[in-house]
Image (cartoon, helix red, strand yellow):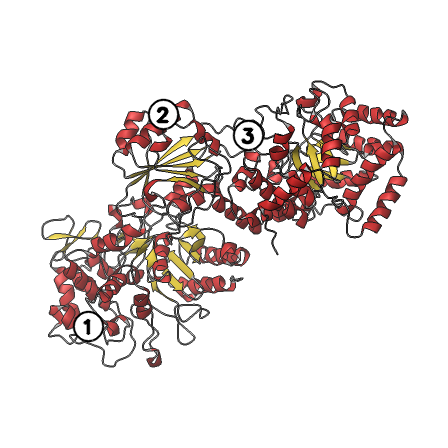
Amino acid sequence: MKFIFAPKIFLLTCFLFVSSQLLSQNNPLLTEDAEAQKQWVDSVYNAMSLKEKIGQLFMVSIASESGADYINKAKKQIAEEYIGGVIFSKGGPGKQAKLTNEFQELSSTPLLIGMDAEWGLAMRLDSTFALPWNMTLGAIQDNNLIEEAGAAISRHTKRLGVHINFAPVVDINTNLNNPIIGNRSFGENKINVAEKSLVFMRGMHREGMLSSAKHFPGHGDTDADSHKTLPTIPFSKERLDSLELYPYYPLITHGLTSVMVAHLNVPALQETPNTPSSLSKSVITDLLKEKMNFEGLVFTDALNMKGLTDNTEPGDAELRAFLAGNDMLLMPENIEVASEVLVNAFKNNIISPGRLAHSVKKILQAKYKTGLHQQKLVQENFLSEELNTVRDQVLLEELFENALTLIKNNKGVLPVKDLEETKIAYVNFGDADGSVFLKELKKYAHIDWVSAVRLNDLQEKLAYYDLVILGYHKSNNNPWASYKFSSGELHWISQISKENKTVLSLFSSPYALSELRGLNELDGILVNYQNHPIAQEKAAQLIFGAIEARGKLPVSIGNNFPEGTGYQTNSLDRLAYGLPESVGLNSYKLGRIDRIITEAIDKKMTPGAQILIARKGKIVYNKNFGHHTYDKQIPVSDTSVYDLASLTKILATLPLIMEQEEEGIVNFDSTLGEMMPVFQNSNKANIRLQDMLMHYARLKSWIPFHINTIDRKTRLPSENYFHKTPSATFNTKVANEMYLRNDMQDTIVNIIKDSDLERNLNYKYSDLPFYILKYYLEAYYNQTLHNLTQKKIYKPLGATHTGYLPTSRFPLEQIVPTEIDKLWRRQLIHGVVHDQGAALQGGIGGHAGLFSTANDVAKIMHVYLNNGVYGGKRYLNEETISKFNTCYYCEKNVRRGVGFDKPQLGSSGPTCNCLSMQSFGHSGFTGTFAWADPEEEIVYVFLSNRTFPDSTNRKLIREDVRSRIQEVIYESIDF
């Protein structure tokens, strides 16, 4: 059962303290095998000399990045001063593991290894994992996630041979000018800080890590840094007990293993003015140990900090700290001198044998508790892999997603709903990179990055936009980095928000908002806390309604936004982005896809490809491979636009017919004669719409319309049909310098009308139904299929890279070529449709002609998978999709739905034969594939140009690459 903290527990604990009736707590250092622990502790202690016992009190600092002289000095201290522990600072994990093993082998008594890893090993080490800072975690409402954060950090520290992590920070940050705590605090609300600290600690303990609450008695309300000076906490005992000390009570009650005492001047608690709390008996012994009944280890903060060393002599601070009640003396300035001072103090009866035994045995108890009586070496193999796992990445995404806090949302400006009618600009501020945010925004809509040197010029540009998204990006390197707006930025943001509907997305401390004038002018404010790439991705997803806003401010921003502010939003069912494990897929197993497609490219089955997998409404695999062509000049990217070939059928024509069926304009029994008068007296007059779309209507599979346009003598495109330049009668572009005669469209219809039907009624795949439906739809709406699909489907969806006639919207280098046509067009087919019939239709066919990216195709497929809804808009009814996705003639060996392809009924077909019969999709001649499975909630998109440079290249098809990849997807399902 997960522990759920209730505020009343805190109130009860505080009440007990105030009445001096706090119940005695169990020693948090004791283990379940307490008797065996005692025997080990006593045996080790009794075998020690006085110098060895004194040495156990010290924990020295070492950076694994240090040079040989510094490391040799540490080794000498281990061997000659018998130090009790090492706190590692900056460096790398491999070096630290190696040093840890060297140090442990050298030490006569196992060393207690410590680190400051408040948000992970990355606080000190390179190439290691960083979780969000405490301020970010403080915004999260699901405390189970905070426990998992504490556990994850502890798995990493433990794997590196660390036994105590000096965390959690339990300071209550009530001073926005605090220079050293700030983002390291869970916030200003004592209950929230206490709850978060408690569950974080529980996660640490779950993984066998010693915890250390800091900075006792409270460093949250100061504007000075104890690393540089001695800050004063000028409050009364009552205030300190009710606020600063508040989080310590539940942590002590639930097994806190250590406390770190800060260097603070706290007059209300100290017997002598200006005595640092770390040297104060009244703070450590009288308050912490006796009144609060804390029996765990007590550490000083670093004894080399200016808050302490400015007023003490070498050795003096260490002795005073020990006499005040500290057990371990952290980072002494001169351990040799300090050790000698303490040895002499013992010999002179200043330190009693009982007092020394008390602390040393507690230290040994802690070492036993961490397993140092059995194992003290670190396995150095696979260290990097085990410190950077997919499990950690999934948690990181969850934490940032749950932290995002929407503190202002005038008229529901977020999430953005109407993409068709909303022209959006992005303007960046701050001195850090915001490219990830912009890239993620562009996955949902067309976004223009607008900039200018002068404010007036920027305002003039922004006047044409319906919504302006401001991204404020500050350094994510550490929680102490400056978060403040410049005076110029404050003015610009104020002016922009006065004239435009404006949303500010803040990738920095919420305290930055305290100086922002014109907060009332902003329509939306989203606080993301950090400029981490994942925070940028999740913020963009929230802005467009792929994920919900759940966070609440952990601190107050003036009077406008009190602590706890946060609007919750609902998802608009747009596709989100994340890791495979977040939806029950296995990243390692999916890695086989990379090998399959890489092999396909190496064997020249295709120059490149886009492959996308979505599950449960989240795109979790979206990769690009290879290049546009074999000359490897242009690598495939997310925005490379592919010719979809026959995917056009289900992504353009079919949804329009489905809409008409819903509206009663047509039905499955509608005949071609009824739909198009030209067919009334033909052999096709009585063909039913349903039969035609199921390829069960005796239609020819294909008619090579272009053959008649080739001059029989020259074998070149006939001048009777084509001109090199457009004119009034030759204005249908087929390819470069190839413009078709206008009356060809009527010719195509007539050829289809007059074509023979197949002798027998069997399943036969045919393009002709979609030729026919193109002309039907354009006649019915008096619009081109290009305009119809843009208006009804792609613009509302935010499918900004989808449509016909790609060169009208994209540069040629963004469009992937399909073939070097040596038979008809005699040129590179690039930027125009590959299919000859669609080319004769000016690139706008019902069966082919559509260009897109895998990301956009997934959006349309998700509409089908999500019962017709996307972005808060209903495109189709659930019943309609089900009706068209039914195999009505399965008993006649027709696998097709109405327009959709379906899994094979036998051993061969379009899929891996490993998925639900409820699934559906289509494939395309150029090497494309799109498939949706309602049962497993999976969308799979594969785009390639296997036809380049020659469409007779069928290696991709023969090797069954698309189906093999689909099989890997289903083998990768863990749950």
The kind of secondary structure element at disc 1 is loop
Residue at the image point whose x is 70% and y is 36% from the top: 259
In the image, what residue type sits under mark 1? Ser
Left or right: 362 with respect to 562?
A: right
Tell which circle, 3 or 2, labels the residue nearer the N-terminal end.
3
Asked which quadrant contains residue 713, the reply is bottom left
In the image, what residue type sits under mark 2? His
Outermost residue to the front = 19
Tag shown at residue 904: none
Q: Can residue 212 be seen in this view?
A: no
Q: Is residue 263 depicted above or below 652 in this figure? A: above
Left or right: 308 with respect to 631?
A: right
Q: Is residue 221 visible?
A: yes
Q: Is residue 712 depicted above or below 152 in this figure? A: below
- Which residue is nearer to you in this view: 653 or 313? 313
Q: Is residue 216 depicted above or below 808 in this figure? A: above
Give x and y (percent) for residue 368: 79, 46
Give x and y (percent) for residue 321: 76, 27
Asked which quadrant contains residue 105, the reply is top right
Residue at the image point whose x is 24% and y is 75% from the top: 697
Give the residue pinned by disc 2. 491
The kind of secondary structure element at disc 3 is loop
In the picture, which quadrant includes the N terminus?
bottom right
Outermost residue to the left = 728
Badge 1: how crowded within 10 Å, few (<14), some, or many (20+)? Answer: some
Q: How far apart are marks 1 and 3 (CA)?
A: 70 Å
Tag shown at residue 480: 3
Give x and y (percent) for residue 332: 74, 27
Badge 3: how crowded within 10 Å, few (<14), some, or many (20+)? Answer: some
